[in-house]
Amino acid sequence: MAYLTRRQFMGAATVAGSVGGVAWLQPTPSGAPHEPYFATLNHALHQAGIGTPTMVLDLVRMRHNADQVKQHVQGRIQLRLVNKSLPCLNLLHELSLLTGTQRQMVFSLPYLHLITQHKPQSDVLLGKPLPVAAAAHYYASRSVSGFEPAKQLQWLVDTPERLKQYSDLARAQQQTMRINIEIDVGLHRGGVPDLAAMQTMVQMIMAEPLLQWAGLMGYDAHTEKIPELIGLRQEARLHAAQTYKRFADYMQQSPLKGSPAGPTLNTGGSPSFRLHDGMGAANEVAVGSAMVKPTDFDTPLLSDFLPAAFIATPVLKTGPFVAPDGVEFFSRMASAWDANQRHSVFIYGGQWMAQPVSPEGLSASALIGKSSNQQILLGSGKQGLRPDDFVFLRPTQSEAVLQQFGDIAVYEHGRITDMWPVFPAQA
Ligand SMILES: Cc1ncc(COP(=O)(O)O)c(C=O)c1O
């Protein structure tokens, strides 16, 4: 029997130790078949004869979210629906009824046409400053619907230069234009930065009788993305609130005060609307995405909201993970090391702004790029998927993504009950 020298023993022990250590790091197989919620949804989609990637809206969950919003705002602060995040007339209609608001925040010329034509009773505030050419286009081509821009529409204006352009347009068209002034409360995406610029704009509005001041808009959702670290988030919240108040107080003392009697003082956004209860300067919050809660909205103040929109896409093929000829070796290595890379699932479509959510334990391949045609997902095989089963993904955002799949499949109590057309994908 050969004995190890002390040195050999130490070397062997180190190797064994590191092999043991590495083995300890080796991923264990994870994943499971669809949990009951998604198994029922899978069944409902089959029952409805759906066989293509589809956006599913869980109406019951969405109503829960709308109720959370309503409970917060009711009797305290007004609510405006952010329609780029909910780009579907039926959806907006349902939410208007549930929350009792006709206020819409619109972000583009095509959607301004759409909303003012199909929801002529709406009170519309632009959520971004449109180039004056787009505003001129609106007046030139708007259809008759009963919507009265001079009473129901607030254009958003961010600089004295743009205000001058809008002033010239109002004069040229002999059109009363209501102006909401964007203020920068800390996001630095745009808006009036200081009281000097505000003073100039107040004077410009005073000088043009066709311009009417309608309110302020200060978007503050950035605060909820700031890490809580050493009080940074709290500081940003405070700064936003104080900045808003400074601008609102200024307007209150300006010659424009009282015109209108109740200006629209808009703030918020899904991540931050719960910071506002009508006790601060703002009297209105804008909310969109929270109604369906995509993954970007897994934020602290929305923890009791439920994900309500899912991409459902059929499985096309499943089998052992084998990379293409020439690099097969790498897939063998990956599978040998990681049990969660042993099984491949090819889905119909892919490369969406979304994350796989069910069945649990599927992820994109690090070896094979994403595909918009037939994306590969990898897993342990514990998911038990077969061709024609559905895989569910959660959008990272609702804006734009909700519009990528044609009509939205409305899901309610275990059944697909309706198909809702979406806004055309236009900027
Ligand atoms: C001005 C403004 N208000 C509010 C929102 C909030 O939208 P959501 O509630 O969908 O996050 C946005 C989003 O971009 C925005 O730009």
Image (tube, helix red, strand yellow):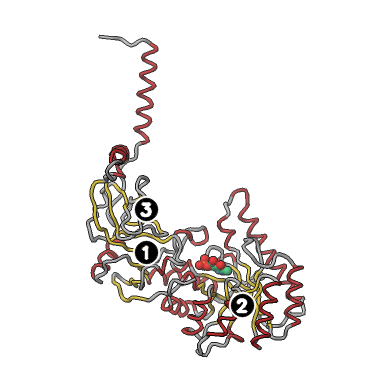
Mark 3 to mark 1: distance in Å? Answer: 19 Å
Q: Please, is residue 320 above or below residue 120 in the view?
A: above
Residue 374 or residue 356, whichever sits in front = 374
**Element under label 2?**
strand
Disc 3 vs disc 1: Cβ atoms closer than 8 Å? no
Q: Residue at x 41, y 68 (%)?
A: 402
Dot 3 amino acid type: Lys
Figure quadrant of the N terminus: top left
Name the residue beneath numbered marker 1.
310
Q: Residue at x 32, y 59 (%)?
A: 373
Q: Is mark 1 within 8 Å of ligand 1?
A: no
Q: Is residue 269 visible?
A: no
User: Where does residue 314 sit, x and y in percent of width and height?
Assistant: 28, 61
Name the residue beneath numbered marker 2.
155
Q: Please, is residue 130 above or below residue 173 in the view?
A: above
Q: Looking at the rendering, which quadrant does residue 355 occupy?
A: bottom left
Q: Earlier in the sequence, mark 3 or mark 1?
A: 1
**Element under label 1?**
strand
Dot 1: few (<14), some (14–19), or many (≥20) neighbours within 10 Å?
many
